[in-house]
Amino acid sequence: MFRLLTRDLRLAVRAGGGFGLGLAFFLLVAVLVPLGVGPEGAVLARIAPGILWVGALLACLLSLDRIFALDFEDGSLDLLATSPMPLEGVVAVKSLAHWLVTGVPLVLVSPVLGVLLNLPVQGYGWLVLSLALGTPALSVIGAFGAALTVGVKRGGLLLSLLVLPLYVPTLIFGAEVVKRGAAGLTVGTPVLLLAGITLGAAALLPFASAAALRVNLR
Amino acid sequence: MLLSVSDLAVARGGVTVLEGMTFGVAAGQALILRGPNGAGKTTLLRTLAGLQPAVAGAVSVPPEAMAYAAHADGIKAVLTVAENLEFWAAVHGTRGIGAALEAMDLVGLRNRRGAHLSAGQKRRLGLARLLVTGRPVWLLDEPTVSLDVASVALFAGVVRGHLAGGGAALIATHVDLGLGEAVVLDLSAFKARAAAGTGAFDEAFG
């Protein structure tokens, strides 16, 4: 299992693209939105939580099809499915690798982008916390979508359409945490719900993803 | 019997291609699967590997016994030969890739990246993976594709060594591997009646 994680991380680093693309997209959104909206600080501060969360979510979506498609094309997925590792474990490890490569850089860079969007000072901690809590759910849910569409040529469109509605709860509660945090309100409820979504998705979805993969490998 | 199959029927794309198959493979035995394109060789091997369910019948094997080698070798272009092989060794909980590299004549290529290998070298790496799985039953789907004559002989030697060590192999191939002791199973004897009239259709499933 650990070797699969290190292999996936090594592949992502050597092949480039993978996490650079998501990060660059996130950066572009955060840089372009203030230019498009205009320099009014109050407006930017109001939309900052939503924009940052939507940007992170779409950046995450960009690299989802790589989770299984590359292994499917070169035959590794067949070989992993016949290996001693349970397929559920393979899915969980590959989701984790996707999060480490895509989600973690987004979390780390988000405070810098918060400055560009004039996020109120008290919101930064909550921004980082909400992304750290929410992005694992994005990776796990995304892996489920990727598993469903793994055999489909050019399945990116289908994957986005399948996954976007599943991302909505994470987006709502994630942005709500930042919004309330920035306004100085209590954030307990959305934080707990966000954590609940992530934990629930991480606990249940690998089983669904593995089942979808088994069907697609036939 | 290491592997025994009774009254097995397998389907591809919803069409039953082979049915009524009953055979066994003992330790030290190789079974060559013969049949024209679309006969169901790949489908049979994938079913035995557990990648797809059987339509009918039963396959009995010890758990974790099958090592499957398909048309695609599962080689990562950005990893070196040694890294590719070490990964599969780690996944299967075995140690040491030296013997496998030597057996398939890959020692000189160990630090070469997958992207820079020729088709035949990739194939040799894909077959070396079988050695690091440590599993007794090899399911080989056209193992000699893109191998030169010397490499085919090399591979036949590896298979012979595996059989001598108590392993078994099912090999779908059109090429004579020079395994004189192997039993040949002609799959056309098990062709499913329903599929008989759809020759042009199941051609696609070679």
Image: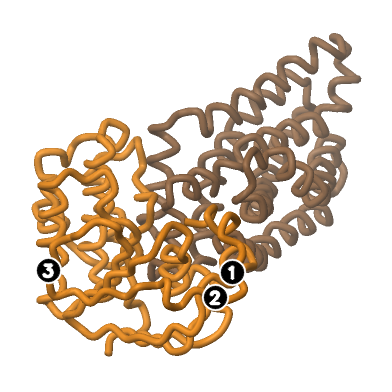
Chain colours: A brown, B orange
Q: Residue B157, position in %: x, y?
A: 10, 62
The circle on residue B70 is none
Give the secondary structure at mark 2.
Answer: loop
Look at mark 3 in the image and give the residue it sits on. Answer: B160
- The quadrant of the picture occupied by the C terminus of chain A is bottom right
State the separation of the CA atoms marked 2 and 3: 32 Å
Question: Mark 1 and mark 2 in contact (Cβ < 8 Å)?
Answer: yes
Q: Is residue B134 visible?
A: yes
Residue A75 drawn above or below residue B140: above
Question: Mark 3 and mark 1 in contact (Cβ < 8 Å)?
Answer: no
The circle on residue B192 is 2
- For badge 2, the amino acid type reads Ala
Q: Badge 1 local density, few (<14 within 10 Å), some, or many (20+)?
A: some
Callout 3: chain = B
- Of the pair B31 and B87, the residue shown nearer to us: B31
The residue lying at 80 percent from left, 33 percent from top is A49
